[in-house]
Image (spheres, rainbow, N blue to C red):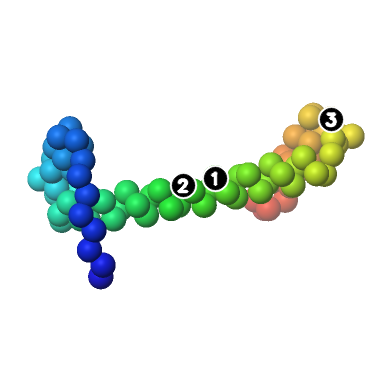
Amino acid sequence: MASLTISVPAALHERVESRVEAGTYADAGDCIRDLIRRDLTATGDDEALAACLAEGEVSGVSERQAPDILAALRQELRGTAA
């Protein structure tokens, strides 16, 4: 495993230490690894959302009205719930 040394403000250091003392993490490195994993997940979610938005913009404006879309969704949910 690679090693990384970082400097953080005292308030962040205290926060990490309190999480370790509470038993949330085994050590500071465990806490930092979890934060990095969460950041990677969030970044992936952001990219997926951006792709969906781009796809929606390219598809143009729907001729369907909101009540029709909602009714179709309700019908679909009833079909999958059965």
Q: Which circle, 3 or 2, is nearer the viewer?
A: 2
Q: Quadrant of residue 69?
A: top right
| Left or right: residue 12 compared with residue 82 | left
**Badge 3: how crowded within 10 Å, few (<14), some, or many (20+)?**
few
In the displayed structure, 18 sits above or below 45; it is: above
What residue occupies the far left of the structure in this picture?
A: 21
| Left or right: residue 58 compared with residue 38 | right
**Image location of residue 36, percent across then percent down:** 35, 52
Q: Quadrant of the N terminus?
A: bottom left
Amino acid type of disc 3?
A: Gln
Q: Are marks 2 and 1 in contact (CB under 8 Å)?
A: yes
- Reading the image, the residue beneath label 1 is 46
**Image location of residue 49, percent across then percent down:** 61, 45
- Residue in view at x 37 percent, y 54 percent: 37
- Residue in view at x 54 percent, y 45 percent: 46
Amino acid type of disc 1?
A: Asp
**Badge 2: how crowded within 10 Å, few (<14), some, or many (20+)?**
few
Q: Are marks 3 and 1 in contact (CB under 8 Å)?
A: no
Label 2 sits on a secondary structure element that is helix
Along the line of sight, the residue nearer the viewer: 34 or 11: 11
Label 3 sits on a secondary structure element that is loop
- Reading the image, the residue beneath label 2 is 42
Residues under labels 2 and 1: Cα distance? 6 Å
- Reading the image, the residue beneath label 3 is 65
Residues under labels 3 and 2: Cα distance? 32 Å
Q: Quadrant of residue 3?
A: bottom left
- Residue in view at x 49 percent, y 48 percent: 43
Q: Earlier in the sequence, mark 3 or mark 1?
A: 1
Q: Which circle, 3 or 1, is nearer the viewer?
A: 1
Residues under labels 3 and 1: Cα distance? 28 Å
Q: Is residue 22 visible?
A: no
